[in-house]
Image: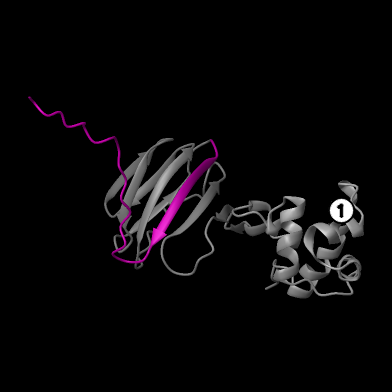
Amino acid sequence: MADDTAAPDEVLTAVGPRLRALRQQRAVTLAQLSAATGISVSTLSRLESGGRRPTLELLLPLARFHRVPLDDLVGAPETGDPRVRLRSVDRNGVTIVPLTRRPGGVQAYKMIYPPGGRPGEPEQQVHEGYEWLYVLSGRCRLLLGSHELTLEAGEVAEFDTRTPHWFGNPYDRPLEILSLFGPQGERLHVRARPSPVRRDVG
């Protein structure tokens, strides 16, 4: 599977053009930048041309001078930027967008179900874990053992996945849900409303 993350050499190669662009945007000469940062003109020139490998000791004073985050100089992706970090997959017609990347712990997904679903009665599944569902839009049919529920937009369900279960969209509108799945025993705590304010009687 291809890795979306740029190789370190590619990231470092892109630093030089960014440094040159920042300097030219501010109409600053290499001599002026050298005087302000204490970095020699030759070193600055080689950094911009790619002849000198950027180091933290060189990038920090340059980031301070240009008043930009260090991440901007090296082209680091924004935290949580879905255009960079998130890739949807299609599974049996359901679009699944992973919202977390950490291995282990609670995993979050956005799931988009087309209307109609599959014909016939669905087969319930059993596995280790704990699941929390929040309906963003549409309606969700949820089977839990012998129980059947219809969740409307804004409603939440939480269940042990060792209970036979299935959820999907047999209805005539698309369904979007947020799913949080955790290891067995890792329950998710939801506060439905604020705790009442305690008033002391004087």
What residue is drawn where x is 78% and y is 75%?
Answer: 9
Quadrant (top left/top right/bottom left/bottom right) for the N terminus: bottom right
The reply, left or right, for residue 128 in relation to residue 94 is: left
Q: Magenta segment: does it hold 131? A: no
| Residue extent of the magenta highlight | 173-202
Toward which corner of the image does residue 56 lie, by quadrant? bottom right
- Classify residue 11 by image quadrant: bottom right
Residue 157 or residue 49, whichever sits in front: 49
x and y percentages locating residue 109 in the rendered image: 50, 54
The residue at the point 52 percent across, 47 percent down is 117
Locate the C terminus by quadrant.
top left
> Which secondary structure type mostly characterizes the magenta part of the structure?
loop
On screen, 125 above or below 151? Answer: below
Identify which residue is drawn at 76% across, 54% down: 65
Q: Where 93 falls versus 176 (above or below)? A: below
Q: Is residue 175 left or right of residue 90?
A: left
Give the camera-side residue of 48 and 30.
30
Residue 151 horizontal side relative to residue 192, left or right: right
Q: Residue 44 or 202: which is nearer the viewer? A: 44
Which residue in the rendered view is the most extreme toward the top? Answer: 202
Question: Where's residue 158, x and y in %?
Answer: 32, 50
In this figure, which residue is indicated by the disc labeled 1? Answer: 23
Q: Position of residue 41 (x, y in %)?
A: 90, 66
Figure quadrant of residue 42: bottom right
- The answer to whether residue 190 is magenta is yes
Depth check: give the residue in front, 145 or 83. 83
Amino acid under disc 1: Arg
